[in-house]
Image: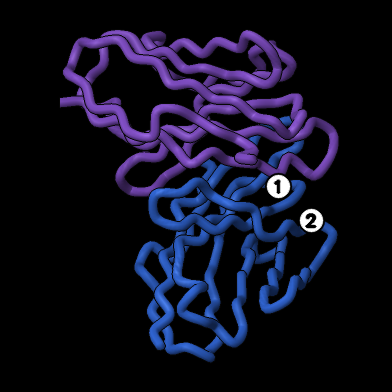
Amino acid sequence: DTAVSQTPKYLVTQMGNDKSIKCEQNLGHDTMYWYKQDSKKFLKIMFSYNNKELIINETVPNRFSPKSPDKAHLNLHINSLELGDSAVYFCASSQDGKDYNIQYFGAGTRLSVL
Amino acid sequence: SQKIEQNSEALNIQEGKTATLTCNYTNYSPAYLQWYRQDPGRGPVFLLLIRENEKEKRKERLKVTFDTTLKQSLFHITASQPADSATYLCALYKRGGKLIFGQGTELSVKP
């Protein structure tokens, strides 16, 4: 069974559209994250949720809105997509207070905005 | 400003040799440092962690060192194999903060 799964794997869309990416983890972890990896491979944290509560919110445009219906799910909704949003988005999870914040990543969603 | 730097150029080595990857950081006092492996089209996978009070950690053919004076970590793969070809990312954790990732070094092991 996949530990952290995100869908879709590929997303191709036009500028101005709204899209969502879904993430689920079956590891029983308390904390989930969204990262963005640009073309230069930099992996930057965008958001972090702990038990459905937002704890990290980096300088991300407010067109990006995360939602955590329960601690096993963290979705990312993006409004009014722009060309610069093209990147690979990774979901990850970790167990609070244990394992030194080791991140377990999903396979990524490659978003292409045309 | 705070920075993490890894070898930006790809590292090409011959099978059987030791690969050494570098992670340098400035203006951090990390509580610990992690190394991840990322294959094309996949998410990063955790490999090793080393704490600020540890000098060296080993796991099979992997070895990590951590020099808080030099502000540097070295990641070694001994007896490298073509299957070790991937991008390797270091990540620092600041107490009370979050994980900050380097940009990764691409390793290519030729048979």
In the structure shown, which secondary structural element does the residue marked by tag 2 occupy? loop
Coordinates of residue B7 in the picture (x, y in percent): 43, 65
Chain A colour?
purple
Q: Chain of mark 1?
A: B
- Residue B99 in sight in this render: no
Q: Amino acid at mark 2?
A: Glu
- Residue A97 in sight in this render: yes
The disc placed on residue B70 is none
**Mark 2 crowdedness (10 Å alpha carbons): few <14, some 14-19, many ≥20:** few
In the structure shown, which secondary structural element does the residue marked by tag 1 occupy? loop
* Circle 2/circle 1 CB separation < 8 Å: yes
Coordinates of residue B98 in the picture (x, y in percent): 65, 34
> Closer to the camera, A1 or B108?
A1
| Disc nearer the start of the sequence (2/1) | 1
Q: Amino acid at mark 1?
A: Ser
Question: In the picture provided, is B103 more to the left or to the right than A100?
Answer: left
**Mark 1 crowdedness (10 Å alpha carbons): few <14, some 14-19, many ≥20:** some
> Closer to the camera, B78 or B104?
B78
> Can you say whether B45 is above or below A57 in the image?
below
Label 2 belongs to which residue?
B52
Chain B colour?
blue
> Can you say whether A50 is above or below B40 in the image?
above
Label 1 belongs to which residue?
B29
Question: In the picture provided, is B41 more to the left or to the right than B1?
Answer: left
Coordinates of residue A33 in the picture (x, y in percent): 59, 28
